[in-house]
């Protein structure tokens, strides 16, 4: 990803023990490496990568906490926004979003507390269609989204948006929704 974007790694440090302690599972190693190199921000002006301490718009834990509280709110019924899955709750099994697009595509991991270290990527298009399962790393999936025009329905290289990265800078990204 560094070579693809021409990015100079930032060397950001994070308290992974605290973050993973709250989640109850370790996060994928390559996600942590991506975060430490890039932080939260936007790839190719359209793919929002969630990091840590980057302001509400790009904060991985804040986004997860909000999704979990909505998913568990009994006043909203028993249908999940990530059906047929649930949002991951510590000790359980469910999805955790780590990226989205300006078109409202969602990129998540399916996390199972009983299988730490196994992080298939689940992705779904903005139209609320079915989830697509990918047995690949976070960085490989992100690379394919940005660089592989044939990676459908999620590849954006066909739109010639370039392979850039803009950091979140600790505030919402120009007010654009995630």
Image (tube, rainbow, N blue to C red):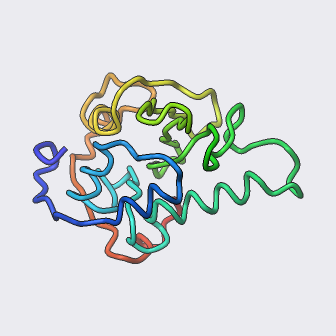
Q: How many marks?
A: 0
Residue at screen point 63% across, 30% down? 129
Asked which quadrant contains residue 28, the reply is top left
Left or right of 35 in this view: 84:
right
Residue at screen point 45% across, 49% down? 98
Asked which quadrant contains residue 150, the reply is top left
Provide residue 133's location: percent of width, then percent of height.
50, 24
The answer to which of 104 and 77 lies nearer the viewer is 77
Picture layout, residue 150 above or below residue 99:
above
The answer to which of 98 and 29 lies nearer the viewer is 29
Split into 4 quadrants, where in the image is the N terminus? top left
Left or right of 162 in this view: 169:
right
The answer to which of 115 and 36 lies nearer the viewer is 115
Residue at screen point 48% across, 46% down? 25
Provide residue 95's location: percent of width, then percent of height.
58, 41
Picture layout, residue 26 above or below residue 18:
above
Provide residue 92's location: percent of width, then percent of height.
64, 41
The answer to which of 158 and 61 lies nearer the viewer is 61
Provide residue 111's location: percent of width, then percent of height.
53, 38
Picture layout, residue 100 above or below residue 123:
below
Residue at screen point 24% across, 58% down? 36
């Amino acid at each position: 990803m560094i070579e693809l974007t021409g990015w100079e790694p930032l060397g950001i440090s994070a308290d992974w023990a605290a973050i993973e302690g709250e989640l109850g599972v370790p996060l994928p190693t390559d996600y942590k490496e991506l975060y430490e190199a890039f932080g939260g921000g936007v790839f190719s002006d359209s793919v929002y990568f969630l990091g840590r301490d980057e302001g509400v718009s790009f904060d991985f834990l804040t986004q997860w906490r909000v999704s979990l509280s909505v998913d568990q709110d009994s006043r909203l019924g028993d249908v999940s926004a990530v059906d047929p899955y649930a949002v991951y709750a510590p000790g359980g099994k469910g999805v955790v979003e780590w990226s989205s697009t300006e078109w409202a595509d969602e990129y998540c991991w399916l996390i199972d507390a009983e299988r730490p270290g196994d992080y298939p990527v689940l992705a779904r298009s903005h139209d609320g269609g079915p989830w697509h399962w990918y047995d690949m790393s976070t960085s490989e999936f992100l690379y394919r989204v940005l660089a592989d025009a044939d990676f459908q329905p999620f590849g954006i290289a066909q739109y010639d948006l370039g392979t850039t990265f803009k950091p979140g800078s600790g505030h919402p990204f120009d007010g654009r929704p995630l």
